[in-house]
Image (cartoon, grey):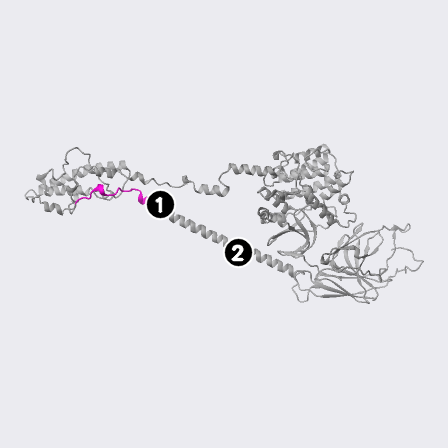
Amino acid sequence: MVASQAAEQIIAGVVLSERLAVTMYGAIHRASFGGQRNLRGLVIDPRMLEESSFRIALTDSGIIEKVIAVEHPAIVPTVGVEEGGPDVVVVTRGVGRYVTVQDLISAAKANRGQGGKLSLPVAAAIGKSVVEALAAAHKAKIVHGAVHPRSVLIDDDGAVRLSDFIVGRALTTAVAQGADSSLWRGLAGYLAPELVVGEDPTPAADVFACGALLFTMLSGEVPPGTLHVTPAVERLVQRALDTDVSRRYKNASDLLENLMEALEDDQWDLADRGEIVRAAGLSRADTNIDEATEDLLASLGNSAVNVTPTRASVDLRAEVAAMRGRGNTTGGKLDALLADLDDSRELTTVDDDRAFRRDPISELIQVDPRRREAIVQIKPRVPSLDDPDEQDTTPLPPPAPTGRESDYDLKAIPSRAGSKDEAAAMDALAGLDEPVRRVSTAAEQASAAADKLEKAAARAEQAAKQVTGSQAVQKPPPASPVARTNLPEMPDFAEQPTPRLRSRALGIIALLVVVGGGVAFYMIYKDQQEKNAAAKEERDRLQREADEQTRLATKAQADSGVITVSAEPADASVWLKLGRTPVDTMPLTSSQMHRVRLELPGYQAVDTEVLPANWAGKGTARKATVNVTLKALAKDPKSGKPMGEVLPARPPNLAVEPKDFEAGEGPIRIETNPPGAEVWLLIGYPNTGVRFPTVAGRAYELRALSDGKLPGFASITADEWREPGGNPNEPIDLAKKRSTIEKRIELVPDPDWKDPKDPKQKKGK
């Protein structure tokens, strides 16, 4: 019986199933996303996400787009980085069964004969692949930042791939920006000195990490130390590890060019994929490689953080940051900006009004020798006395005192009191005392006043003569005290407030400042409101997209289906092909026995059973492991064909069924030595009914066997599960599917069949 694959968790549309491994960055799960299966989802450790700088760098859309766009055989492809609530998952393509270079180094250390060193061809091949991956990344303006033996994967095909581009760059960027340096646990010895003191990761930092990786593979120890290899390679590693960035290779492209030259000069051979597979132990059956890797990485997380005293410590970064803080009292970029905005040199200054407590005009008026009570204003001004520049009149400064009464004092000239010529002269003089209309500098005011005084005196004298001549026949009226009392007196200038010449300008400036400040505040407020609205709209959009992805992923969960098979003859056995070893089956029930047939040309076919002892785990998280070593067949000396036993259509021991199976479900991991064997699962017999529950929407291959008959085959394509009448362009994972597919297989006689019970039959295949 087969159960549908159940998801452990769904994060922003990423469907996560069983956990495969645990790394320093978090747990790796089998995942499906966007209609793609066979992916890997790295769920970032929540403790790392507590560092805001790490989370921001991890979800930088610009870096993510660059990494996704990079395609290279030595780089683990990144599908995306999805953020759902507090969780972040990095989605990559699966690489099947793999080990890390750290596993190889640890295994070499356990072997006393190797002392932690890898063979020269294997180390050279791994180093070349890593440098090629980094060269492609640097060409695309991508920096890894955290290259380490644990980030270099070797799969069961012997391919070497570099992973953790997104999370590695985010890690080193965050610590460079001041995040907790404990995030760097396990990376000691592979970090360039400039990273330790707080600089951002650069291609030169990746070159240093590659040099450290080569050093460790060739010596068995983390640098610094002494490397004893051939001269050219030794010089290359030393230059890559140079603490002076100016002497180090600038990027991975320079390092790759020099690496190939060094390998050629020292006549090093590069291991092929088969040698790498054997060195990684992937050619042997490993009963629990994922668990072993988890335990190893967990132990390395504590033991690999010791930093040698000869290298710059992480505390140096904090000291440098503190020194920078003491040298900069502005409090950062924001404070510096505010200080610049507060710079008084950029503003227009206003003079202190205390300078205008007394002004030159007022002083001149106060020393006026004329008796103010005698200066009167006659009603109409004589037109000829009007100032031609009347619109620009300036207060008249009085003449300097002479120690005697002024000629214009009425009391000093009693014989002319009340005459019209006197009145005209007084009227002209009174017109000179109009209020100030416009002022300039004090020197200009005094000069203009003196000139106008002279002109006014001359005009007054001429007017007086004209008036005297025209009125000579008329007798002037006698002076009357009553008449004088009706004349308006000039105000006492000493009682008037001192004019503040720039008060209006100050008021205008103050008004402009207030208005400008109000407008600026409104614009800032409006801009902030628009930004807040845009940010809220963007958050709502992202949340809607995440909800939609989650809905689609939930809808795209594996649908249950049933395969029914009939055959002729009815006593045939029906088998379902699971793939080639090593293979993980779909989730199968653990409450019954499963019979499997393994076939590989040149080797004896084997029937095996999945017993209770093969299962581990509980409930829906169970997993079974089966390991079989195949036996090579001897060849017929005459025909040269391999000789082996022909297995019956029905496997033996069908009546044996252990009763101590435990309820649950999970995949079965089947491995053979050598790998590549076809795996067939027995699903039933037509005469008793073949009804096999499975996952709808997937392709399957069926086979029917009967003694004396040729094998019969039938296949089911993924599109056959589509419900008739549905949208043919809709992805099959989202389409509505049929619940049952029926297949019939008719077998034909085998003309070369020989009964194995016949003692005369020769063994052959």
- Within 10 Å of disc 2 (Cα), the crowding (few <14, some 14-19, many 20+) is few
Q: Amino acid at mark 1?
A: Ile
SS for callout 2: helix
Q: Quadrant of residue 35?
A: bottom right
Q: Earlier in the sequence, mark 1 or mark 2?
A: 1
Q: Is the residue 371 above or below the residue 35 in the image?
A: above
Residue at the location (91% across, 50% down)?
A: 638
Q: Nearer the viewer, residue 221 or 452?
A: 221
80 and 461: which is toward the camera: 80
Residue in view at x 48 percent, y 42 percent:
335
Q: Quadrant of residue 652?
A: bottom right
Left/right of residue 208 with respect to residue 521 in the rendered view: right
Res 537 label: 2
Other residues around mark 1 within 10 Å, as few (<14) / some (14–19) / many (≥20): some
Identify the element where label 1 is drawn: helix
Q: Amino acid at mark 2?
A: Glu
Nearer to us in this view, 624 or 251: 624
- Which part of the image, by quadrant, shows the C terminus? bottom right
The numbered dot on residue 509 is: 1
Image location (x, y in percent) of residue 684: 80, 63
Image coordinates of residue 523 in percent, x first then y, are 44, 51
Q: Is residue 705 left or right of residue 241?
A: right
Query: Can you tell which mark lies on residue 640?
Result: none
Residue 491 painted magenta: yes
Q: Is residue 289 visible?
A: yes
Span colored in magenta: 489-509
Does 66 appear in magenta?
Answer: no
